[in-house]
Protein backbone atom coordinates (compact mmCIF):
# COMPACT_ATOMS: atom_id res chain seq x y z
CA UNK A 1 0.00 0.00 0.00
CA UNK A 2 1.34 3.41 -0.94
CA UNK A 3 0.24 6.77 0.45
CA UNK A 4 -1.68 7.87 -2.64
CA UNK A 5 -3.66 4.62 -2.59
CA UNK A 6 -5.09 5.25 0.89
CA UNK A 7 -8.43 6.93 0.42
CA UNK A 8 -10.09 9.27 2.87
CA UNK A 9 -12.78 6.68 3.52
CA UNK A 10 -10.16 4.03 4.32
CA UNK A 11 -8.50 6.38 6.79
CA UNK A 12 -11.83 7.05 8.50
CA UNK A 13 -12.57 3.33 8.76
CA UNK A 14 -9.12 2.72 10.21
CA UNK A 15 -9.40 5.46 12.81
CA UNK A 16 -12.82 4.18 13.92
CA UNK A 17 -11.50 0.72 14.71
CA UNK A 18 -7.74 0.46 14.19
CA UNK A 19 -7.38 -2.76 16.20
CA UNK A 20 -9.84 -4.60 13.99
CA UNK A 21 -8.32 -3.26 10.78
CA UNK A 22 -4.80 -4.24 11.83
CA UNK A 23 -5.90 -7.70 12.91
CA UNK A 24 -7.57 -8.26 9.55
CA UNK A 25 -4.54 -6.86 7.71
CA UNK A 26 -2.30 -9.43 9.40
CA UNK A 27 -4.70 -12.31 8.79
CA UNK A 28 -5.20 -11.36 5.14
CA UNK A 29 -1.45 -11.24 4.56
CA UNK A 30 -0.99 -14.78 5.85
CA UNK A 31 -4.01 -15.98 3.90
CA UNK A 32 -3.18 -14.32 0.58
CA UNK A 33 0.50 -13.40 0.29
CA UNK A 34 2.80 -15.63 -1.75
CA UNK A 35 5.46 -15.36 0.95
CA UNK A 36 3.37 -17.84 2.95
CA UNK A 37 3.42 -20.45 0.18
CA UNK A 38 5.84 -23.36 0.38
CA UNK A 39 6.77 -22.85 -3.26
CA UNK A 40 10.18 -24.58 -3.00
CA UNK A 41 8.45 -27.71 -1.68
CA UNK A 42 4.77 -28.45 -2.22
CA UNK A 43 2.83 -25.16 -2.37
CA UNK A 44 1.39 -25.73 1.09
CA UNK A 45 1.52 -22.94 3.66
CA UNK A 46 4.11 -22.12 6.28
CA UNK A 47 1.57 -20.65 8.69
CA UNK A 48 -2.07 -21.00 9.62
CA UNK A 49 -4.35 -18.12 10.69
CA UNK A 50 -2.52 -15.84 13.15
CA UNK A 51 -3.44 -14.76 16.63
CA UNK A 52 -3.09 -11.00 17.17
CA UNK A 53 -2.75 -9.01 20.39
CA UNK A 54 -2.07 -5.45 21.46
CA UNK A 55 -0.44 -3.70 24.40
CA UNK A 56 0.09 -0.14 25.53
CA UNK A 57 3.65 1.02 25.07
CA UNK A 58 3.57 2.23 28.67
CA UNK A 59 2.55 -1.17 30.09
CA UNK A 60 4.68 -1.67 33.24
CA UNK A 61 5.78 -5.08 31.93
CA UNK A 62 8.03 -3.44 29.35
CA UNK A 63 9.90 -1.65 32.14
CA UNK A 64 10.03 -4.82 34.26
CA UNK A 65 11.78 -6.57 31.38
CA UNK A 66 14.75 -4.25 31.97
CA UNK A 67 15.22 -6.06 35.28
CA UNK A 68 14.05 -9.53 34.27
CA UNK A 69 16.03 -9.72 31.01
CA UNK A 70 18.56 -6.90 31.16
CA UNK A 71 18.96 -3.15 30.84
CA UNK A 72 19.71 -3.73 27.15
CA UNK A 73 16.10 -4.79 26.50
CA UNK A 74 14.38 -1.88 24.79
CA UNK A 75 11.05 -0.37 25.78
CA UNK A 76 8.50 0.71 23.16
CA UNK A 77 9.17 4.29 24.20
CA UNK A 78 12.89 3.93 23.46
CA UNK A 79 12.15 2.42 20.06
CA UNK A 80 9.75 5.18 19.01
CA UNK A 81 12.03 7.90 20.41
CA UNK A 82 14.93 6.54 18.33
CA UNK A 83 12.74 6.41 15.21
CA UNK A 84 11.71 10.03 15.72
CA UNK A 85 15.31 11.14 16.29
CA UNK A 86 16.17 9.74 12.86
CA UNK A 87 13.51 12.09 11.49
CA UNK A 88 14.96 15.02 13.45
CA UNK A 89 12.17 15.01 16.03
CA UNK A 90 11.91 14.49 19.75
CA UNK A 91 9.18 12.43 21.41
CA UNK A 92 6.89 14.89 23.22
CA UNK A 93 5.71 13.83 26.67
CA UNK A 94 2.16 14.37 25.47
CA UNK A 95 2.55 11.58 22.87
CA UNK A 96 4.10 8.88 25.06
CA UNK A 97 0.69 7.51 26.04
CA UNK A 98 -0.12 6.97 22.36
CA UNK A 99 2.59 4.35 21.85
CA UNK A 100 1.26 0.85 21.24
CA UNK A 101 2.61 -2.60 20.43
CA UNK A 102 1.11 -5.07 17.95
CA UNK A 103 2.10 -8.72 18.35
CA UNK A 104 1.10 -11.81 16.38
CA UNK A 105 1.45 -15.57 16.63
CA UNK A 106 2.05 -17.63 13.48
CA UNK A 107 1.04 -21.27 14.12
CA UNK A 108 2.66 -24.08 12.14
CA UNK A 109 0.16 -26.29 10.26
CA UNK A 110 -0.51 -29.92 11.15
CA UNK A 111 1.60 -31.41 8.35
CA UNK A 112 4.67 -29.45 9.45
CA UNK A 113 4.15 -30.38 13.07
CA UNK A 114 3.49 -34.02 12.21
CA UNK A 115 6.70 -34.28 10.18
CA UNK A 116 8.79 -32.91 13.05
CA UNK A 117 6.92 -35.02 15.60
CA UNK A 118 8.34 -38.15 13.94
CA UNK A 119 11.94 -37.00 14.34
CA UNK A 120 14.16 -37.69 17.35
CA UNK A 121 17.51 -36.16 16.39
CA UNK A 122 17.20 -33.63 13.57
CA UNK A 123 14.44 -31.31 12.40
CA UNK A 124 12.28 -32.54 9.54
CA UNK A 125 12.67 -30.99 6.10
CA UNK A 126 9.34 -29.19 6.43
CA UNK A 127 10.32 -27.77 9.81
CA UNK A 128 13.73 -26.61 8.57
CA UNK A 129 12.16 -24.90 5.55
CA UNK A 130 9.59 -23.26 7.80
CA UNK A 131 12.32 -21.92 10.06
CA UNK A 132 14.02 -20.40 7.00
CA UNK A 133 11.32 -19.36 4.52
CA UNK A 134 8.56 -19.16 7.13
CA UNK A 135 10.55 -16.61 9.08
CA UNK A 136 11.19 -14.74 5.82
CA UNK A 137 7.39 -14.59 5.52
CA UNK A 138 7.24 -13.26 9.09
CA UNK A 139 9.74 -10.54 8.16
CA UNK A 140 7.66 -9.65 5.10
CA UNK A 141 4.63 -9.35 7.37
CA UNK A 142 6.56 -7.07 9.71
CA UNK A 143 7.46 -4.81 6.77
CA UNK A 144 3.86 -4.94 5.51
CA UNK A 145 2.42 -3.73 8.83
CA UNK A 146 5.05 -1.00 9.12
CA UNK A 147 4.36 0.18 5.55
CA UNK A 148 0.61 0.19 6.14
CA UNK A 149 0.97 2.38 9.23
CA UNK A 150 3.47 4.68 7.51
CA UNK A 151 1.04 5.18 4.64
CA UNK A 152 -1.57 6.30 7.14
CA UNK A 153 0.86 8.79 8.66
CA UNK A 154 1.91 6.88 11.78
CA UNK A 155 5.44 6.18 12.97
CA UNK A 156 5.98 2.41 13.09
CA UNK A 157 8.99 0.17 13.68
CA UNK A 158 9.61 -3.58 13.54
CA UNK A 159 12.37 -3.80 16.18
CA UNK A 160 13.93 -7.07 14.99
CA UNK A 161 14.43 -5.59 11.52
CA UNK A 162 16.47 -2.67 12.81
CA UNK A 163 20.09 -2.70 11.53
CA UNK A 164 21.28 -2.49 15.14
CA UNK A 165 19.34 -5.59 16.23
CA UNK A 166 21.53 -8.51 17.26
CA UNK A 167 21.55 -11.30 19.81
CA UNK A 168 23.99 -11.04 22.68
CA UNK A 169 25.19 -13.14 25.56
CA UNK A 170 24.35 -11.74 28.97
CA UNK A 171 25.94 -13.03 32.17
CA UNK A 172 22.56 -13.15 33.95
CA UNK A 173 20.18 -14.64 31.36
CA UNK A 174 22.54 -16.12 28.77
CA UNK A 175 21.69 -15.58 25.09
CA UNK A 176 19.15 -12.81 24.68
CA UNK A 177 18.07 -10.00 22.37
CA UNK A 178 17.18 -6.33 22.84
CA UNK A 179 13.58 -7.13 21.84
CA UNK A 180 12.17 -10.49 22.90
CA UNK A 181 9.21 -11.41 20.70
CA UNK A 182 8.04 -13.90 23.33
CA UNK A 183 8.03 -11.36 26.14
CA UNK A 184 6.27 -8.86 23.90
CA UNK A 185 3.62 -11.47 23.07
CA UNK A 186 3.13 -12.11 26.78
CA UNK A 187 2.55 -8.39 27.37
CA UNK A 188 -0.05 -8.55 24.58
CA UNK A 189 -1.92 -11.38 26.31
CA UNK A 190 -1.14 -14.03 23.69
CA UNK A 191 0.29 -16.80 25.86
CA UNK A 192 2.81 -17.76 28.55
CA UNK A 193 6.27 -19.25 28.84
CA UNK A 194 7.24 -22.89 29.26
CA UNK A 195 9.90 -25.09 30.82
CA UNK A 196 11.85 -25.19 27.55
CA UNK A 197 11.73 -21.38 27.10
CA UNK A 198 9.07 -21.72 24.42
CA UNK A 199 5.81 -19.79 24.35
CA UNK A 200 2.52 -21.63 24.81
CA UNK A 201 -0.46 -19.97 23.11
CA UNK A 202 -4.06 -21.09 22.46
CA UNK A 203 -2.57 -22.48 19.20
CA UNK A 204 0.22 -24.25 21.06
CA UNK A 205 3.95 -23.59 21.00
CA UNK A 206 4.87 -24.70 17.47
CA UNK A 207 4.80 -21.06 16.41
CA UNK A 208 6.82 -18.03 15.37
CA UNK A 209 6.14 -14.56 16.71
CA UNK A 210 6.36 -11.05 15.26
CA UNK A 211 5.67 -7.52 16.40
CA UNK A 212 5.58 -3.85 15.47
CA UNK A 213 5.72 -0.75 17.68
CA UNK A 214 3.75 2.30 16.58
CA UNK A 215 2.95 5.83 17.69
CA UNK A 216 -0.78 5.22 17.59
CA UNK A 217 -3.15 4.64 20.47
CA UNK A 218 -4.64 1.15 20.24
CA UNK A 219 -6.86 -0.71 22.69
CA UNK A 220 -4.75 -3.16 24.75
CA UNK A 221 -5.80 -6.81 24.70
CA UNK A 222 -7.12 -8.46 27.81
CA UNK A 223 -4.48 -9.88 30.14
CA UNK A 224 -5.66 -13.49 30.31
CA UNK A 225 -2.91 -15.01 32.40
CA UNK A 226 -2.12 -14.57 36.09
CA UNK A 227 1.32 -16.20 35.96
CA UNK A 228 4.01 -16.02 33.24
CA UNK A 229 4.20 -19.85 33.08
CA UNK A 230 0.52 -20.58 33.61
CA UNK A 231 0.06 -22.58 30.39
CA UNK A 232 2.91 -25.02 31.13
CA UNK A 233 1.74 -28.20 32.88
CA UNK A 234 5.05 -28.46 34.73
CA UNK A 235 4.29 -25.18 36.49
CA UNK A 236 0.67 -26.13 37.15
CA UNK A 237 1.96 -28.87 39.45
CA UNK A 238 1.14 -31.50 36.82
CA UNK A 239 3.69 -34.15 35.99
CA UNK A 240 4.78 -33.56 32.41
CA UNK A 241 8.31 -32.73 31.27
CA UNK A 242 7.70 -34.20 27.81
CA UNK A 243 9.94 -31.52 26.30
CA UNK A 244 12.81 -32.87 28.42
CA UNK A 245 12.55 -36.23 26.68
CA UNK A 246 12.22 -34.63 23.23
CA UNK A 247 15.48 -32.66 23.41
CA UNK A 248 18.29 -34.50 21.56
CA UNK A 249 20.90 -32.25 23.16
CA UNK A 250 19.89 -32.83 26.78
CA UNK A 251 19.49 -29.07 27.08
CA UNK A 252 16.19 -29.22 28.99
CA UNK A 253 15.90 -30.44 32.58
CA UNK A 254 13.42 -29.95 35.40
CA UNK A 255 15.43 -26.83 36.23
CA UNK A 256 14.81 -25.31 32.81
CA UNK A 257 16.54 -24.67 29.49
CA UNK A 258 20.33 -24.58 29.02
CA UNK A 259 20.65 -21.98 26.26
CA UNK A 260 24.34 -22.64 25.63
CA UNK A 261 23.88 -26.38 25.23
CA UNK A 262 20.90 -25.80 22.94
CA UNK A 263 22.77 -23.26 20.86
CA UNK A 264 25.79 -25.54 20.50
CA UNK A 265 23.56 -28.34 19.24
CA UNK A 266 21.60 -26.35 16.68
CA UNK A 267 24.86 -24.93 15.32
CA UNK A 268 26.62 -28.30 15.29
CA UNK A 269 28.11 -29.79 12.13
CA UNK A 270 25.63 -32.70 11.97
CA UNK A 271 22.68 -30.30 11.96
CA UNK A 272 24.36 -28.06 9.41
CA UNK A 273 24.99 -31.10 7.22
CA UNK A 274 21.36 -32.19 7.50
CA UNK A 275 20.11 -28.74 6.46
CA UNK A 276 22.48 -28.83 3.49
CA UNK A 277 21.00 -32.22 2.54
CA UNK A 278 17.61 -30.53 2.54
CA UNK A 279 18.94 -28.04 -0.03
CA UNK A 280 19.01 -25.05 2.29
CA UNK A 281 21.81 -22.53 1.77
CA UNK A 282 23.08 -20.79 4.92
CA UNK A 283 19.78 -21.34 6.74
CA UNK A 284 19.16 -20.17 10.31
CA UNK A 285 19.66 -22.83 12.98
CA UNK A 286 16.59 -24.99 13.50
CA UNK A 287 15.54 -27.93 15.64
CA UNK A 288 12.14 -27.51 17.29
CA UNK A 289 11.87 -31.10 18.48
CA UNK A 290 10.83 -29.88 21.94
CA UNK A 291 7.97 -27.92 20.34
CA UNK A 292 6.43 -31.00 18.73
CA UNK A 293 5.39 -34.35 20.14
CA UNK A 294 4.44 -32.61 23.40
CA UNK A 295 1.01 -31.86 24.95
CA UNK A 296 1.45 -28.13 24.27
CA UNK A 297 2.31 -28.57 20.58
CA UNK A 298 -0.95 -27.18 19.17
CA UNK A 299 -3.00 -26.01 22.17
CA UNK A 300 -2.83 -25.02 25.81
CA UNK A 301 -2.14 -28.47 27.26
CA UNK A 302 -4.52 -30.56 29.30
CA UNK A 303 -3.28 -32.87 32.02
CA UNK A 304 -5.22 -35.77 30.49
CA UNK A 305 -2.97 -35.61 27.42
CA UNK A 306 0.06 -36.77 29.39
CA UNK A 307 0.74 -40.38 28.48
Image: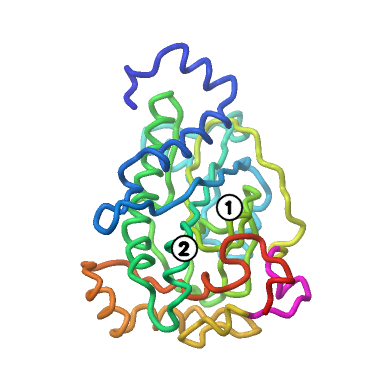
Report the residue marked by disc 1: 185
- Residue at disc 2, secondary structure: loop
Camera-side residue of 226 and 213: 226
Q: Nearer the viewer, residue 5 or 241?
A: 241
Above or below residue 256? Residue 149 is: above
Q: Which is more N-terminal, label 2 or label 1?
A: 2
The residue at the point 71 percent across, 75 percent down is 234
Residue at position x 28%, y 78% from top? 274
Query: Disc 1 vs disc 2: which is toward the camera?
Result: 1
Residue at (72, 48) in percent of width and height: 223
- Find the distance from the CA under tag 1 to the CA under tag 2: 15 Å
- For label 2, the crowd category at 10 Å Cα-Cα, with few meaning under 14, some 14 to 19 and many 20 or more, is some
Residue 10 is covered by the magenta coloring = no
Which residue, given by chain and number where applicable, does mark 2 sit on? 177
- Is 5 drawn above or below residue 185 in the view shown? above
Q: Residues within 10 Å of mark 1 (few under 14, many from 20)?
A: many
Residue 146 percent coordinates (x, y)? 41, 37
Q: Is residue 40 left or right of residue 200?
A: left
The magenta span reads 231-241
- What mark, if any, has residue 267 been given in the picture? none
Q: Position of residue 44 (x, y in %)?
A: 35, 52
SS category of the residue bearing label 1: helix
Task: Answer with the quarter of the image where residue 231 lies.
Answer: bottom right
Give the position of the C terminus as an image quadrant.
Answer: bottom right
Q: Nearer the viewer, residue 145 or 119?
A: 119
Query: Residue 53, how many percent across, how many down?
Result: 59, 43
Residue 239's place in the image compared with 52, above or below, is below
Query: Residue 244 location, x and y as percent?
Result: 58, 83
Task: Report the front residue among 29 and 119.
Answer: 119
Q: Is residue 180 left or right of residue 282?
A: right
Amino acid sequence: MRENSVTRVEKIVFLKNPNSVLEQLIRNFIKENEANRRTPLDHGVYWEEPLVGFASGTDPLFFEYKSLIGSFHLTPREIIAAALREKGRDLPLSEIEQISVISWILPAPEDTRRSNRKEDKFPSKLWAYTRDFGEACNNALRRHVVSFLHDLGHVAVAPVLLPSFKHLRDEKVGWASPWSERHVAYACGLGTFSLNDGFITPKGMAVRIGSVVTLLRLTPSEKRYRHPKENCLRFRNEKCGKCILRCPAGAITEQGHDKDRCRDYINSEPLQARRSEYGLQNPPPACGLCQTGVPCEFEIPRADLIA
